[in-house]
Image: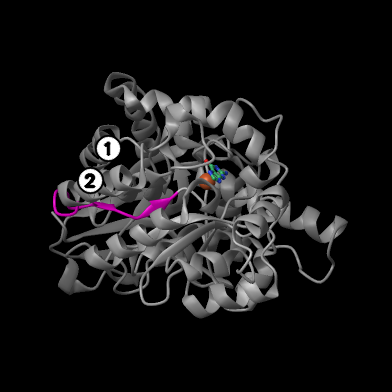
Amino acid sequence: MRDYVLRGNLCYSADMDHIETRAHAYLVCLDGRCAGVFDQLPARYAQLPLADFGDRLILPGMTDLHVHAPQFAFRGLGMDMELLEWLNTYTFPEESKYRELDYAGRAYSSFVQHLRRSETTRAVIFATIHVPATELLMQKLEDAGLCSYVGKVNMNRNCPDYLREDSTVQAVRDTRRWIEETKDRFTRTRPIITPRFIPSCTDDLMYALRDLREEYDLPVQSHLSENYSEIAWIRELCPRAKHYGDAYDQFGLFGGGYPCIMAHCVHSNEDEQALIRQRGVFIAHSPESNINLASGVAPVNQFLDNGLRVGLATDIAGGSHESMLRATMHAIQASKLRWRLYDQNVKPLSFERAFYLATMGGGAFFGKVGSFLDGFELDAVVLDDGTLDHPQALSVRARLERAVYLADERNITAKFVAGERLF
Ligand code: GUN
Ligand code: FE
């Protein structure tokens, strides 16, 4: 059933600097898309089924633009290292376990159940190099009713034998088989080309992934300019590249004519930012991960001022939690520390902008997603903030801001994805 009306306190971005709040208003959904917000329900919609959520808050579902499903099991552990050491010490040993389908089944069930209960309606996900486990993850996400892109990870150098593709030929054969098996199998779950990052892929593998991308017309995701040692390494590995982004671009894997997400961009210089903008690359800003791995803080407000496309991400297990409400809070907090301690030229993120990043900003990767404006796919989360009691009556705007800081999945009472009600 994709024609209905929701009623409650609606909160959604109109653009990156404005949040609309409409108390006890009606949101009409026709064929899974938003078809108007009204204070009084027009007579022509009176026959539609009405879900009245009373005094609860209704916000757009959130998009996690970058998350590692196989790292969910060690979230909250191993926060004592920087990126490259952290990968070798914690991440690669954990990801190697997904060779076993039994382990993958248990771990991915846990990840998907948490995601389903969370405020995330859409996610762009890294799996591991293993095809059977990646397909199992995709099936679980599909069954849960979430919308996602999932990447079988590619890595064939600078990684341990136990988590390395045997050869470029083998990697390409596996990736092609996985694309063939998944590209038309689901309605909400789609494959995305996923080189882990340049240090873990040989040049010939990168070019082969470019060719596969073109052949099947798929989007791309990877990591960019997250950590100083990583960037120094790129200068050795790709001496002809002007910067890290240029290296991806030379491999033909940096967007421009097709969708592409680069996670982090903490240390992207002016030239790199210009290329990101030119190619329409989405930046997946992952503030908690950038704190935990001591990577730094990306100048997100500058990205937005300069017209770059940005969304928010948890980057589990760099980030410790799947909650996009928390990610929104962390984005604001990190931007304040960056401004106070490091660079007074880039102002802290406003609440409006942070909320926009979590909803409309990242949602744009999926099309018209992340707002209740007309024509947007209906992704919605209903929050009961009754447990966040307060001695005074608060405005809807104030309740929304408090909910972002204080609510968790226990406050979520209903969830809709692409017009379908999950619970
Ligand atoms: N760069 C390459 N792999 C990873 C990863 O798994 N997590 C993060 N945060 N950065 C990476
Ligand atoms: Fe990541």
Q: Is mark 2 within 8 Å of ligand 1?
A: no
What colour scheme was applied to this rendering of the protein? Answer: one colour
Q: CA distance from mark 1 to mark 2?
A: 6 Å
Residue extent of the magenta highlight: 183-195
State the residue in front, 248 or 235: 235
Mark carried by residue 131: 1
Q: Amino acid at mark 1?
A: Val
Q: Does residue 371 appear in the picture of this structure? A: no
Residue 4 magenta-highlighted: no
Secondary structure type for disc 1: helix
Q: Quadrant of the N terminus?
A: bottom left
Residue drawn 32% across the image and 45% down it: 171
Q: Amino acid at mark 2?
A: Trp
Q: Residues within 10 Å of mark 1 (few under 14, many from 20)?
A: many
- Residue 397 image offset from top left, x and y in percent: 57, 59
Residue drawn 24% across the image and 47% down it: 173
Residue drawn 64% across the image and 64% down it: 239
| First in sequence: mark 1 vs mark 2 | 1
Residue placed under numbered mark 2 in the picture = 178
- Tell whether 11 sits left or right of 295: left
Residue 188 magenta-highlighted: yes
